[in-house]
Structure formats: C-alpha cells, structure tokens
Image (cartoon, helix red, strand yellow):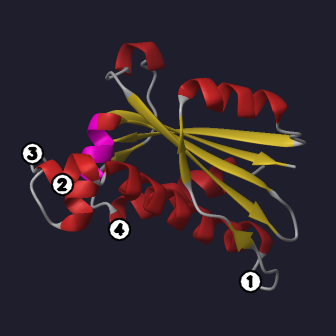
C-alpha cells in the first residue's frame, strides 16, 4: 500500500539532498549487486500511527552522500567520519516527508533521532518489533542497492 509513496519520497530525497542519481530496481539480484560493507540506520515515529523506518546502504555510498552533503571530495577523511550522520539525516528527511504524504498534513508525528544499528541488532529488532504491516523497497542509487523498510505497528 505504501510502496510507491516510499519509493517516490526516497527517490526525491536522494536526488535533492544527496545529489545522487537514482534508477528503478532492475532484474539483477541483490546478491549480484552487493558492494561490501553495509550501514543500517533506524528512525522511530509516533502519531496517528507508529512504526519504524529502516535504511540499509553500502558504506561506500554513505561516504559519497556525506561528501556530497558537505561539499567535499569523497576521499576526504571527513566524508568517512560523517557518513553515519549523513545517512541518519537522509533517513530523517525521508521519514519527515513520507509521513505527511501517507497521512496528510493534518496529523502530527513525533520523529525520533535516527541511529545506526548493526546487522545483528537490526535482525533482532525486526524479529521483536510488533509489526502489523511491512513495506520493503529497493532503490538503485549511484548503481548501488539501497534497502528501505517501513514497519507499521
């Protein structure tokens, strides 16, 4: 139900805030596109409905986002140091734009601070989280797969 809205919102944020090129997912399997170490982040929200928004992104792409957002070169050490913050900010922007697109502008939502989470902790969180509905989206950003999951309580 929320798949297209999540996709379109994320696409707009990746293009406008991270200055990244976005392509629709293709037929290539995720395993064939895997580019190494990944970074995951989560943001919780409460309001008319509650849940989590999760992003999993290749570390290399996170560094690129940080460089683009800071206006520095990708090989600048600051880009690596700020990659977690950049992904958290992108996730926060996606969530902040997604909720009004889904619920309308009337309801108010409290959006928590995004935080990085290990793949092990993410698997446990997803297993424990009481989810009524999950929407998964893959977006190809700069030829790399970005996974988004919207989990509604």
**Residue nearer the viewer, 97 or 91:** 91
In this image, 91 relative to 37: left or right? right
Residue position marked by numbered label 4 in the rendering:
16
Q: Which one is earlier in the sequence, the residue at label 4 or at label 1?
A: 4
CA gap, disc 4 and disc 1:
21 Å
Per the model, the C-alpha gap separating discs 3 and 2 is 8 Å
Q: Residue at x 12, y 61 (%)?
A: 72
User: Which stretch appears magenta?
Assistant: 60-65
Res 62 → quadrant: top left
Which structural element holds mark 1?
loop
Q: Which residue is mark 3?
A: 75
Q: Earlier in the sequence, mark 4 or mark 3?
A: 4
| Picture coordinates of residue 27, whole percent (x, y) | 46, 21
Disc 1/disc 2 C-alpha distance (Å): 37 Å
Q: CA distance from mark 1 to mark 3?
A: 40 Å
Residue 105 - label: 1
User: Taking 153 as reference, is 95 left or right?
Assistant: left
In the visual, does 132 lie left or right of 105?
Answer: right
- Mark closer to the observer (1, 3): 3
* Quadrant assignment, res 55: top right
Nearest the viewer among 105 and 42 is 42
- Magenta region, mostly helix, strand or loop? helix
64 inside magenta stretch: yes
Residue 77 belongs to the span the image colors magenta: no
**Which of labels 2 and 4 is toward the front?**
2
Residue 78: which numbered mark, if any?
2
**First along the sequence among labels 1 and 3:** 3
- Residue 28 sits in quarter: top left
Q: For this view, does 112 lie left or right of residue 106?
A: left
Frontmost of labels 1 and 2 is: 2
């Amino acid at each position: 139900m929320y798949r297209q809205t999540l996709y379109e919102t994320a696409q707009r944020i990746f293009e406008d805030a991270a200055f990244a090129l976005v392509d629709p997912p293709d037929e290539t399997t995720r395993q064939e596109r895997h580019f190494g170490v990944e970074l995951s982040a989560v943001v919780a929200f409460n309001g008319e409905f509650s849940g989590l928004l999760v992003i999993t992104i290749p570390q290399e792409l996170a560094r690129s986002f940080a460089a683009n957002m800071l206006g520095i070169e990708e090989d600048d050490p600051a880009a690596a140091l700020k990659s977690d913050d950049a992904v958290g900010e992108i996730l926060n922007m996606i969530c902040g734009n997604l909720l009004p697109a889904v619920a309308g502008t009337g309801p108010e939502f409290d959006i928590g601070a995004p935080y990085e989470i290990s793949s092990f902790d993410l698997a446990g969180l997803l297993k424990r989280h009481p989810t009524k509905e999950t929407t998964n989206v893959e977006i190809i950003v700069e030829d790399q797969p970005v996974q988004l999951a919207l989990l509604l309580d």
